[in-house]
Amino acid sequence: MNWSWHVFTIAGIPVRLHWTLLFVPAYYLFGRIGGGTDPLWSAFIAAGLVMNFAIILIHELGHCWATRRVGGHVDQILLWPLGGMAYVGHSDDPRTDMFVAVSGPATHLLGGVLCVGLIFLLGIPWNWDYINPISKRLWWFGFGPTLAVDALNVNMMLLAFNLFVPAYPLDGGRILLDILTLRQGSWRAARTAGTISIIIGIAIVLLAFTTRDFFLAFIGVWVLLNAMQLRATTQADDTYSIKGYSDRGYRFEEPRKEGFFAKRRRLKRERRVAQLDAEEAELRRRVDELLDKVNKDGMASLTPTERKTLEQASARLRRHD
């Protein structure tokens, strides 16, 4: 992926950082808290940023775990200023996609329970504002205890925002799209979910201007772009639907120009298919070599490693065939 760096791999999943992520610590350390601030507070802000993106990474790992559970494949995780994105692939079944979508926010519920246990373990006085996702209250119990309280608040905020805001491509929007697909079919579901997401995206942008929240504005614009792209996928169908038919026959219009994000997704899919094809071709070549060896010298000529390779390859090829 262009403009990103591979930083580490976890559970066989490459984790990459987008270059724009560098603006986040700069924004908070130099813009929000300014110069001359207590070094302890600056260190706390830095630790809080690391904690936030660790929580986001766990969220994306939840999606990856669910994808593997349903037999899909995971390419990578990208962290960027607006959060994270898990590049995964699975079947088109709405129920499968719903399970994958829910598994991300579910990590915040588990993380929240662990944070509550840690808070009581540290003897921090309980306050219900800790789990209020829109609370603006500030608290300080020392470096570590305050991080534990903030971690609980961040988990609850991300749980509420991702699960209960039905705006595509947020998890709540994906769940809404899946439910509508089961009830209305994919075309009408995309149209309805896209319209709802556009309205919510506009509301988020207006709220961001009211509260002067820089990142919330970017989230709103991001939701708007994805929602309009989702709804645009239904426009092409109009040309060939009943509305696109006249007494002169079918109306054939010029194909729409492929959008930037659609092109990136298409190229990623094509690269993935080419990679899988190359791996399968190499696997078949290796199997043919081993079978030739068996035909000439018998099964006894195979080493334990070659036997295992042949068995695994045969099982894999049978699944694909």
Image (cartoon, helix red, strand yellow):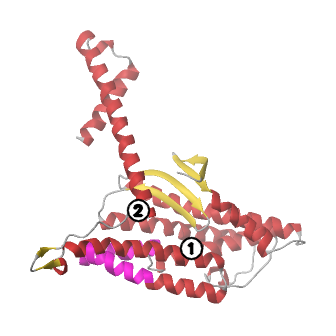
Earlier in the chain: of badge 1 and badge 2, it is: 1
Residue 25 in the figure: left or right of residue 294: right
Going by the picture, which residue comes out furthest to the top? 297
Q: Judge depth for marks 1 and 2 and give the one in front.
A: 2
Magenta span has 46? no
Secondary structure, magenta segment, majority class: helix
Q: What is the crowding at mark 1: few (fewer than 14 residues within 10 Å), some, or many (at least 20)?
A: many
Residue nearest the viewer, comparing 215 with 69: 215
Residue positioned 55% across, 69% down in the render: 108
Residue nearest the viewer, comparing 71 with 180: 180
Q: Position of residue 288 (x, y in %)?
A: 28, 23
Marks 1 and 2, how far apart at CA: 27 Å
Look at the image and tell me in which quarter the C terminus lies. Answer: top left
Going by the picture, which residue comes out furthest to the bottom? 210
Q: Is residue 86 above or below residue 142?
A: above
- The residue singled out by tag 1 in the image is 158
Residue 120 in the figure: left or right of residue 231: right
Residue nearest the viewer, comparing 129 with 207: 207
Q: Is residue 176 above or below residue 52?
A: below
Find numbered disc 2 in the image and state the secondary structure of the residue it sits on. helix
Label 2 sits on what residue type? Ala
Find numbered disc 1 in the image and state the secondary structure of the residue it sits on. helix
Label 1 sits on what residue type? Leu
Q: Position of residue 225 (x, y in %)?
A: 47, 73
Magenta span has 187? yes
Magenta stretch, residue numbers:
169-198
Picture quadrant of residue 133: bottom right
- The residue singled out by tag 2 in the image is 262
Picture quadrant of residue 199: bottom left
